[in-house]
Image (cartoon, helix red, strand yellow):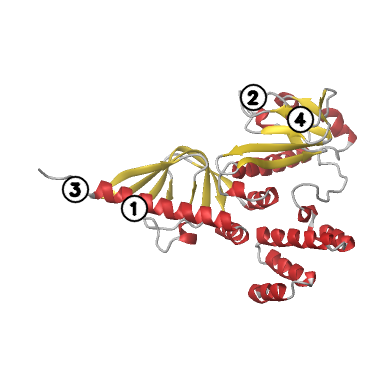
Amino acid sequence: MIRPDLDRLKQLAETNSDNPKFLENYANALLQDGKLILARKLLQKLYGRLHRANRHDDAYRLVMTHGEWVAGEEGGFRPEWEGPFLRLEKEVKKSFFYRRQKKVREGEALFRTGEAAEQIYLVLEGELAITIRSELAGHVLANFVYRGDLVGESALKSNATRVADVVANKNSTLFEFNREELANAISKHSDLRDLFEEEVSLRRKTLILSQCPPFSLLTLSERAIVAEQSIEMDVPNGTTIKKEGAHLPYSALVISGEIESYFTADMKPNYSGSLYANALFGLGELYLDEAIPNKLVAKKDVKLLKIPHKVVEDASEAHVDFETVVSGIASTNYAQTMETIRILSSNPPTN
């Protein structure tokens, strides 16, 4: 595939701002080049421009061509549909759906962060919003759930607590069932199991990103893009994640566990700090001229979200605030590590 001339298409879009076709051509080239976040940002800008110009047919065509997300997070175009669990055959429905229903009025919480997670829900009618609290961005929209979507998957683990607030945007009706009922139904239908695992994985990764300060600055659809291109990775205790003086070939977000940092001095390893949940690292290749001279080692078992560098670059191009935060993280980590190494490597004062 021939790489599109992005600089030329960008220039044409800027010099022909009165012609939306040039902006769409640039966005299509970005999509082809894998810059999905920046492309979506531009297409949403184009969608708004067409609506303001009362070119509603063109706006509708844009949505049909590129997907509902071009209309933005809220109040955008979303066709009537049934999620994967409502499209199943009758015999699957019979074993999966139970008669217990729960109704939630507009503005009412289905559950709140910190509550015991005991039930899982399937949305029959309505719309609910999933939000979490971010230190950097305050309340962050982590997802929407609609007819046919599942919500409350944290109840799959015993003794779990809720990690987000779920509030009804509209009067909603849901099926309610426990982990044993869901596991029993899924075990009987392989297609259902695959759908469930795919949906839960994407929802979990989006929620993980929503809790990380830099990614909480992105829109929900942009976080979903990052989630789709990221991989959850289990790292056993004692595994070397990064060697001294080497760049990590990807960026990574710590989901759980602890990663210890070491540097070598006097022929022995010296501990210089740790990374915990929500810590973002591996940005050196993107933002630093030289690699940090430390080794990163998993302490106990660690779970990471592995994020390709290209995805981080894409988000940086689309959002100045995101670029400022992640480049600041890289610079701060480098400065702190080098200062720690300097202090620990210095000889103690002599009397």
Query: If you read the primary sequence from the N terminus, does the residue marked by circle 2 or circle 3 appear first?
Result: 2
Q: Pointer 1: what residue?
A: 338
| Residue at the left extreme, as displayed | 351
C-alpha span from label 2 to label 3: 52 Å
Q: State the image quarter where residue 61 is shown.
A: bottom right
Residue 57 shown left or right of residue 247 in the figure: right
Mark 1, Cα crowd under 10 Å, few <14 / some 14-19 / many 20+, is some
Q: Pointer 4: what residue?
A: 121
Q: Quadrant of the C terminus?
A: top left
Q: Residue at x 68, y 66 (%)?
A: 30
Q: Pointer 2: what residue?
A: 115
What amino acid is at disc 2? Glu
Query: If you read the primary sequence from the N terminus, does the residue marked by circle 1 or circle 2 appear first?
Result: 2
In the rendered image, residue 273, in percent from the top left (x then y), is placed at 37, 42
Local SS, label 3: loop
Q: Which is in the foreground here, disc 4 or disc 1?
A: 1
Query: If you read the primary sequence from the N terminus, does the residue marked by circle 4 or circle 3 appear first?
Result: 4
C-alpha span from label 4 to label 1: 49 Å
Is there a contact, CB below 8 Å, between mark 2 and mark 3? Answer: no
What amino acid is at disc 3? Asn
